[in-house]
């Protein structure tokens, strides 16, 4: 190496061209390339390939077959039902998320962390178990089954059951996005607004809400995507009545199990597109408003 | 170990962090790199350590060109501003880290390492804390562990980045004296970075003042304070105010009148006369070098500070007066300057306010 | 007397706090309470008997075992992915970063049929290992879909984001001074990585592992299509719950659910204890 020669020259050697030292806090170029290759390969095989497969399988028999899949009345009613369920569950969860974040972020009270753990609970409960809870309560042999039956009410194998199960699995999403951000923002702006004579609701509407609007949108998007795509919980309470209690994911399952692969993947591609759009908006929001959306994300 | 820095240059994009810096550091001396933030002092320290790769110039450790050595090979003891202790390791393991994992160092037995660590803990007066974790120590104790860890590898040179920056004022003073003591005991060539002029003046043998990536002056604390080489040094070190003057044939002219002071050095043209508050005394308007009116009086420690408006443009001069001197706001006074310095007017006058602010931080 | 809450000038506590509890009660607490009630009405002896039925036990063992392996694989590769995404800049990094969220964004049933299509013997990857492939001529044919191996693939898919998203903020907050300190003390890069960086992020890695594991145990949608669902071989616990419910065997379903809930609870506890422990020991000092 020339390094020894340079050492021998000593201080009198005068100006020399600068030597680029490798950064002490990163890996060698070769190690970096290897690690990037591993990461890219892993993500490509496990994450990207399934996404591509959805669209490839859906278009396997051409565009006409793809669009023909959406003429099936059962599929259309599944799409409609999914929209209805989400339209009920998501607004309820938004109200809950706003109430929970207001109570938790703007006040100090005992048992706050316990309450936070309860809100996180659905993340750690299997969706199948979530659906089962409602069957135990409202199913034919559940705690309220007999009472419901005698009053001619139906929750399980009907829309109310689907809505309840969907709310269960999606309700932390909005609250989870809002709470850390509102905690970080503190209460000084609200106090300023109140001291200027604004009422409580006015303060919430004009001060708090604008401060968290991007995080709220973000939470609503995640909540909606999950509500429309939920499978495990709704599959327990749905009863799989064609044209009546099948949401899109359940319709995908039925089509798939009937070996109607093109239709199954075509319907699945709608959900995948919804997921992709959500992901795109989410990434856009993070990129544009990263500082206004809390960094603490865990799903 | 003697250090020679030759024509060192470092750019961050278009912004020169170091601009042709030449500095000789004598073996065994304690030298401070002083400057406001953004002056390049930390970049210089990191370049010496090998943490920063310069864009030009060389660094010699003795006769050895260190520019081509990696940070691992340079064998420098670096004490980081926030200590950078390994939180998951006990104090013993922190200090032993370099002895255990240092490249190209002769492996010592565990018993030897332990003996050496305990010796160092004794030196930094932390006996008995080897089994603790960093989070169990106070800020001052962590600072000392960081120093012990740096000393453990028997470094050729000891580098400290804002060593007392994160500590409160009381602890800082104590540690300052103690660091000087350790330096005198171990005799390492020591370079430390600070933005605190008091710290630099009190602690070091010599001070190197940096501004905007350039070396302004290197000298003993006395030289820096008494004979500042540049307007920046004058403004940055200690208090000063200044008057705009016109220099002509070695005479300073203020608002058309030649000032009755000695000859000044700057070439003909616009210049500034810098005066420290303690070098201003009051006399009658007729006798003073310039006339002014007292516009404000404040008590400051054992003195009184007077704000004096001078000339038609109301330039402000500050004077430090004994409290018993009888003056009041509105008085017409004459000003005498016991000492002053004149410099050619910089296109960009030193940002006095900024410099002060940094010292206070 | 200690107060329940700190007084505040801000209105609306009573209303929102009350609503939160009401909502929680209706949506979460009463339904989960039903499970607890049902389980306790069975009694421990009956529960034990139900759980040790051979098909139930096999399903639980399969779910827990595969989830453990999948979470471990995710811990290793998730660490690499998180490191690459936070530390290196390369073309396509942003896209790759967004792709990590795909398992969150893709509904589980969609992921399930897509994974099955890929790993089935005639699928893109499945065919590389099936009868007649180069792999088969050396090692014999390897079936991925409709075997426990397929379940493993699905569990890796859904668990990865948990590890990556838990590690990313920790890695980007990692104090570079720590690595520089290690370098000035003479440590090689590899030593710095294994002795300084890895132990520092280990609590977060453990948290990510636990979250991925908990999710995998309860996962249903992405697994049932690829699993093949052969009783005793590739039948997972959540599927068995559904089978029991369809047979109106609420007791059998509740027993399995109880086992899974208890496990989830312990995982959460473990995560919280780890975080508390690391906060206490390692502190938030720099």
Image (tube, rainbow, N blue to C red):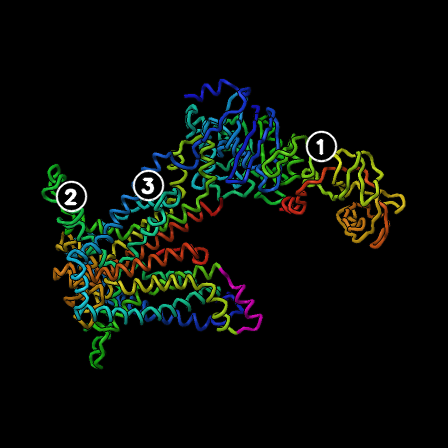
Decide: few, some or many residues near mark 2? Use Cα within 10 Å; few <14, some 14-19, many ≥20: some
Q: Position of residue C70 (x, y in %)?
A: 25, 48
Label for residue A36? 3
Q: Which residues are magenta?
A: A185-198
| Disc 1 with disc 2 on a shared chain | no
Label for residue B222? 1
Tell me what residue is drawn at x 46 percent, y 18 percent: A5
Q: Secondary structure at mark 1?
A: helix
Against A21, is A197 above or below?
Answer: below
Separation of marks 3 and 1 at Cα, in angstroms = 56 Å
Pointer 1 and pointer 2: residues touching (CB < 8 Å)?
Answer: no
The kind of secondary structure the magenta stretch mainly shows is helix
Dot 2 corresponds to which residue?
Answer: C128
Q: Is residue B130 left or right of residue C223?
A: right
Of circles 1 and 2, which is in front? 2
Q: Position of residue C169 (x, y in %)?
A: 41, 49
A186 magenta-colored: yes
| Disc 3 with disc 1 on a shared chain | no
- Name the subunit of mark 3: A
| Disc 3 with disc 2 on a shared chain | no
Q: Position of residue C246 (x, y in %)?
A: 16, 66
Q: Is residue B95 visible?
A: yes
Q: Is residue C57 visible?
A: no
- Name the subunit of mark 2: C
Decide: few, some or many residues near mark 3? Use Cα within 10 Å; few <14, some 14-19, many ≥20: many
The answer to which of A93 and B246 lies nearer the viewer is B246
Against C62, is B238 above or below?
Answer: above
Q: Is residue B178 left or right of residue B240?
A: left
Label for residue A75? none
Pointer 3 and pointer 1: residues touching (CB < 8 Å)?
Answer: no
Q: Secondary structure at mark 3?
A: helix
Q: Secondary structure at mark 2?
A: helix
């Amino acid at each position: 190496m020339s390094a020894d020669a340079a050492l021998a020259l000593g201080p009198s050697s005068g100006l020399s061209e600068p030597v680029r030292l490798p950064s002490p806090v990163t890996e060698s170029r070769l190690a970096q390339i290897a690690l990037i290759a591993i990461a890219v390969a892993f993500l490509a095989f496990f994450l990207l390939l399934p996404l591509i497969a959805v669209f490839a399988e859906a278009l396997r028999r051409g565009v006409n077959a793809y669009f023909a899949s959406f003429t099936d009345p059962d599929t259309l009613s599944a799409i409609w039902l999914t929209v209805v369920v989400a339209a009920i569950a998501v607004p309820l969860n938004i109200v809950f998320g706003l109430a929970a974040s207001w109570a938790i972020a703007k006040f100090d009270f005992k048992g706050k962390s316990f309450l936070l753990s309860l809100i996180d609970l659905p993340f750690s409960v299997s969706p199948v178990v979530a659906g089962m809870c409602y069957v135990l309560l409202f199913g034919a042999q559940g705690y309220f089954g007999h009472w419901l039956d005698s009053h001619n009410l139906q929750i399980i194998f009907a829309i109310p059951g689907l809505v309840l199960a969907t709310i269960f699995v999606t309700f932390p999403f909005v609250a989870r996005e809002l709470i850390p951000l509102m905690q970080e923002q503190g209460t000084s702006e609200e106090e300023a607004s109140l001291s200027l004579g604004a009422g409580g609701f006015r303060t919430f509407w004009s001060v708090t809400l604008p401060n968290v609007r991007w995080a709220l949108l973000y939470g609503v998007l995640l909540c909606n995507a999950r509500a429309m795509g939920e499978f495990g919980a709704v599959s327990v309470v749905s009863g799989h009545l064609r044209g009546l209690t099948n949401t899109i994911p359940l319709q995908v399952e039925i089509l798939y199990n009937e070996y109607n692969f093109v239709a199954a993947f075509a319907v699945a591609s709608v959900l995948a597109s919804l997921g992709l759009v959500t992901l795109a908006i989410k990434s856009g929001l993070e990129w544009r408003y990263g500082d206004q959306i809390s960094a603490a994300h865990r799903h | 170990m003697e250090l020679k820095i030759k024509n060192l240059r470092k750019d961050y994009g278009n912004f020169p962090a170091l601009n042709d810096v030449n500095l000789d550091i004598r073996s065994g001396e304690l030298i401070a790199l002083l400057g406001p933030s953004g002056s390049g002092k930390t970049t210089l320290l990191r370049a010496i350590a090998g943490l920063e790769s310069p864009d030009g110039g060389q660094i010699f450790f003795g006769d050895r060109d260190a520019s081509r050595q990696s940070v691992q090979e340079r064998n420098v003891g670096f004490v980081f501003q926030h200590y950078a202790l390994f939180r998951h390791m006990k104090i013993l393991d922190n200090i032993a880290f370099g002895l255990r994992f240092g490249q190209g160092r002769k492996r010592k037995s565990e018993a030897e390492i332990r003996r050496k660590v305990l010796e160092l803990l004794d030196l930094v007066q932390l006996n008995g804390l080897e089994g603790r974790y960093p989070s169990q120590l106070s800020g001052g104790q962590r600072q000392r562990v960081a120093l012990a860890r740096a000393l453990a590898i028997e470094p050729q040179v000891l580098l400290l980045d804002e060593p007392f920056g994160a500590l409160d004022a009381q602890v800082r003073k104590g540690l300052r004296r103690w660091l000087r003591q350790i330096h005198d005991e171990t005799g390492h060539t020591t370079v430390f970075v600070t933005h605190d002029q008091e710290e630099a003046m009190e602690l070091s043998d010599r001070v190197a003042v940096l501004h905007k990536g350039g070396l302004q002056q290197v000298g003993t604390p006395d030289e820096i304070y008494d004979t500042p080489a540049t307007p920046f040094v004058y403004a940055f070190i200690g208090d000063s105010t200044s008057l705009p003057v016109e220099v002509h044939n070695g005479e300073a002219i203020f608002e058309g009148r030649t000032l009755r002071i000695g000859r000044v050095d700057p070439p003909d043209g616009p210049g500034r006369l810098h005066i420290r508050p303690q070098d201003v005394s009051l006399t009658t308007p007729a006798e003073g070098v310039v006339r002014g009116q007292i516009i404000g009086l404040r008590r400051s420690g054992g003195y009184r500070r007077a704000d004096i408006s001078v000339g038609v443009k109301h330039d402000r001069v500050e004077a430090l007066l004994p409290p018993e001197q009888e003056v009041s706001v509105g008085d017409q006074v004459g000003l005498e300057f016991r000492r002053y310095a004149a410099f050619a007017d910089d296109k960009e006058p030193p940002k006095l306010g900024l410099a002060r602010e940094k010292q206070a931080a | 007397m200690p107060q329940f809450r700190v007084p505040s000038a801000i209105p609306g506590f009573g209303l929102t706090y009350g609503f939160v509890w009401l909502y929680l009660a209706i949506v979460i607490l009463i339904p989960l309470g039903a499970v607890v009630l049902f389980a306790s009405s069975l009694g421990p002896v009956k529960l034990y008997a139900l759980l040790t039925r051979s098909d139930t036990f096999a399903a639980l063992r399969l779910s827990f075992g595969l989830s453990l392996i999948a979470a471990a694989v995710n811990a290793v590769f998730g660490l690499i992915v998180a490191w690459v995404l936070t530390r290196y800049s390369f073309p396509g990094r942003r896209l790759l970063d967004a792709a990590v969220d795909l398992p969150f964004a893709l509904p589980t049933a969609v992921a399930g049929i897509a994974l099955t299509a890929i790993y089935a013997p005639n699928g893109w990857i499945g065919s590389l290992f099936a009868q007649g492939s180069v792999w088969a001529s050396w090692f014999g044919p390897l079936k991925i879909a409709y075997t426990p191996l397929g379940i493993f693939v699905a569990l890796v898919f859904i668990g990865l984001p948990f590890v990556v998203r838990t590690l990313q903020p920790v890695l980007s907050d990692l104090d570079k001074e720590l690595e520089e300190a290690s370098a000035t003390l003479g440590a090689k890069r590899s030593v710095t990585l294994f002795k300084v960086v890895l132990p520092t992020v280990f609590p977060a890695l453990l948290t990510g592992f636990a979250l991925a594991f908990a999710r995998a145990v309860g996962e249903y949608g992405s697994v049932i299509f690829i699993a093949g669902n052969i009783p005793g071989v590739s039948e997972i616990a959540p599927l068995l719950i559904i089978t029991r419910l369809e047979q109106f065997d609420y007791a059998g379903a509740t027993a399995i659910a109880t086992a899974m809930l208890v496990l989830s609870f312990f995982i959460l506890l473990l995560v919280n204890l780890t975080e508390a422990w690391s906060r206490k020991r390692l502190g938030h000092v720099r």
